[in-house]
Image (cartoon, helix red, strand yellow):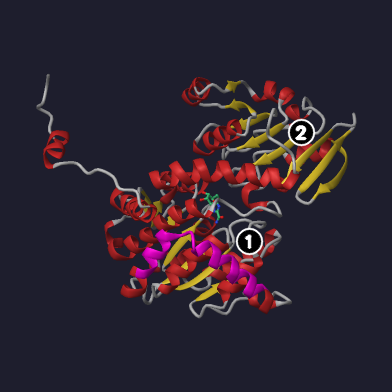
């Protein structure tokens, strides 16, 4: 079944040698700032925990992800990888990965829907025993089109909020037929990747793409989950006036008590200068909002899929449409207002031409958890039934300890007396 119609990246690029060198240079830089993966990799190289396994991956194929892919391959796995977003792949990194004897990379930037899914199928044709997803496209394609492979799959791991959300819905329907770790839901992922990673990289990508300032702007953050919190905090730190929209009453209250303005999108639409969606839901900014927006606003999305801003409706309203800058599409309305959409409404921190994804340090943490989850699934897979599983807390702590040690940060431990106290119920006043 490994004979696939869709070719690896090495067969798709003109100047392959140059691409490989550039990709390797990006990976070398990332590697210098990824002490967790370095430590895990040393362990994997010594113990070869993945020998004989085939790992299928659909992730944002850029330099940091490449270090995860290599770490798994160095641990003995045969890895087939493709992208999880049509615009987030770095072709040079994909090409550099594809030179590894244990790795085949199908990821390519700018693919259309057909090529995107052909590449997913090419990964599946390797008959993976483990899947690592960012957004659940691999799990979905296997269940829908290749159910005969499920028996051979030990388990999987899922990187992102949207993927875990989809998996839980699938699990609730009784449709998920192998175990998958919810990597996104660990403290090491949520508290750092979702908050700091999304916050820093989304704002940096928008600033670099537009060359505009945050100071004094009204920045509307849709959704106050972990990602929204990060975006709001970092925007406030850049001297923006932050407005939050939220549907969940406790989160709305939390944003209010953090000092942000909270209001419905219908009101925020009138005053916002920049709109950034982080909800994971569809139709967050729609026609009635476009109609009220000021001339020149920026619209961007930091959620996994490009469904939060209704671009079809915006296109219908527009009398003209043109590329105002690299990564910025201006939609001109009948009354002359221009609304600027960044990165086609796709995951802005990865999909704009200048985007580099989350900072290296946070991805080291997230991918450290991914790596030990794959190890756990292979060592103890029989302990996990089909369905979504929380990552064992000890694994998450293991990654935190490696990072603290690398940073030279020492911390306290419980004494025996303290541990006993915390475990008992009979201490009163
Ligand atoms: N993400 N990956 C990167 N490789 O540069 N940046 C962000 C990268 C992940 C992040 O963990 C998030 O959960 C997911 O992308 C959304 O698709």
- Which residue is labeled 2 in the image? 297
Instruction: Give, as a single range, the part of the protein colored magenta.
Output: 19-42
Residue at 50 percent across and 80 percent down: it is 101
Residue at 51 percent across and 42 percent down: it is 196
* Ligand 1 contact, mark 1 (Cβ < 8 Å): no
- Which residue is labeled 1 in the image? 89
**Where is residue 261 shown, x and y percent of the image?**
59, 21
**Where is residue 63 shown, x and y percent of the image?**
56, 63
* Ligand 1 contact, mark 2 (Cβ < 8 Å): no
Quadrant holding the C terminus:
top left
Quarter residue 121 falls in: bottom right
Residue at 52 percent across and 71 percent down: it is 80
Is residue 106 at all visible to an observer of this figure? no
**Where is residue 274 shown, x and y percent of the image?**
70, 33
**Where is residue 148 shown, x and y percent of the image?**
45, 67
SS type, badge 1 = loop
SS type, badge 2 = loop
Quarter residue 11 falls in: bottom right
Please name whichever residue, 354 or 159, is drawn nearer the observer in this view of the structure.
354
Q: For the residues marked 2 and 1, what is the alpha-carbon distance in whole angstroms?
A: 28 Å
Q: Is residue 38 magenta?
A: yes
Instruction: Identify the main secondary structure in magenta.
Output: helix
What is the crowding at mark 1: few (fewer than 14 residues within 10 Å), some, or many (at least 20)?
A: many
């Amino acid at each position: 079944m490994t004979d696939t119609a869709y070719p690896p990246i090495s067969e798709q690029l003109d100047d392959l040698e140059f691409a490989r060198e550039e990709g390797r240079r990006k990976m070398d830089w990332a590697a210098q700032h990824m002490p967790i993966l370095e430590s895990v990799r040393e362990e994997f190289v010594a113990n070869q925990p993945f020998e004989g396994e085939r790992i299928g991956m659909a992730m944002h194929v850029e330099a940091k992800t490449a270090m995860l892919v290599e770490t798994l391959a160095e641990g003995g796995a045969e890895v087939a990888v493709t992208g999880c977003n049509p615009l987030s792949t770095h072709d040079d990194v994909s090409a550099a990965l594809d030179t590894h004897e244990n790795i085949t990379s199908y990821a390519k930037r700018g693919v259309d829907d057909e090529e995107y899914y052909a590449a997913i199928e090419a990964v599946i044709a390797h008959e993976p025993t483990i899947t690592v997803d960012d957004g659940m496209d691999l799990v979905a394609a296997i269940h829908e089109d290749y159910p005969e492979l499920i028996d051979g799959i030990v388990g999987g791991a899922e990187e992102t909020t949207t993927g875990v959300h989809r998996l839980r819905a699938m699990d609730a329907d009784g449709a998920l037929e192998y175990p998958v770790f919810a990597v996104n839901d660990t403290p090491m992922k949520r508290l750092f990747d979702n908050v700091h990673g999304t916050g820093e990289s989304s704002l940096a990508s928008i600033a670099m793409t537009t060359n505009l300032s945050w100071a004094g702007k009204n920045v509307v953050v849709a959704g106050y989950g972990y990602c929204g919190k990060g975006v709001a905090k970092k925007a406030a730190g850049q001297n923006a006036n932050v407005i939050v929209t939220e549907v969940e009453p406790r989160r709305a209250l939390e944003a209010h008590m953090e000092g942000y303005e909270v209001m419905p999108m219908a009101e925020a639409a009138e005053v916002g200068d920049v709109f950034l969606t982080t909800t994971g839901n569809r139709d967050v900014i729609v026609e009635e909002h476009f109609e009220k927006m000021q001339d020149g606003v920026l619209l961007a999305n930091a959620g996994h899929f490009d469904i939060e801003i209704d671009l079809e409706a915006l296109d219908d309203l527009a009398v003209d449409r043109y590329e105002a800058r690299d990564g910025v599409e201006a939609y001109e309305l009948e009354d002359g207002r221009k609304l600027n959409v960044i990165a086609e409404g796709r995951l802005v921190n990865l999909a704009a031409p200048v985007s580099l994804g989350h900072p290296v340090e946070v991805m080291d943490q997230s991918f450290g958890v991914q790596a030990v989850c794959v190890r756990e699934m292979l060592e103890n897979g029989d302990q996990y039934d089909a369905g979504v599983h929380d990552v064992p807390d000890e694994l998450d702590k293991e990654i935190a300890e490696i990072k603290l040690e690398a940073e030279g940060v020492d911390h306290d431990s419980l004494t025996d007396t303290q541990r006993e106290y915390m475990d008992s119920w009979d201490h009163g006043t």
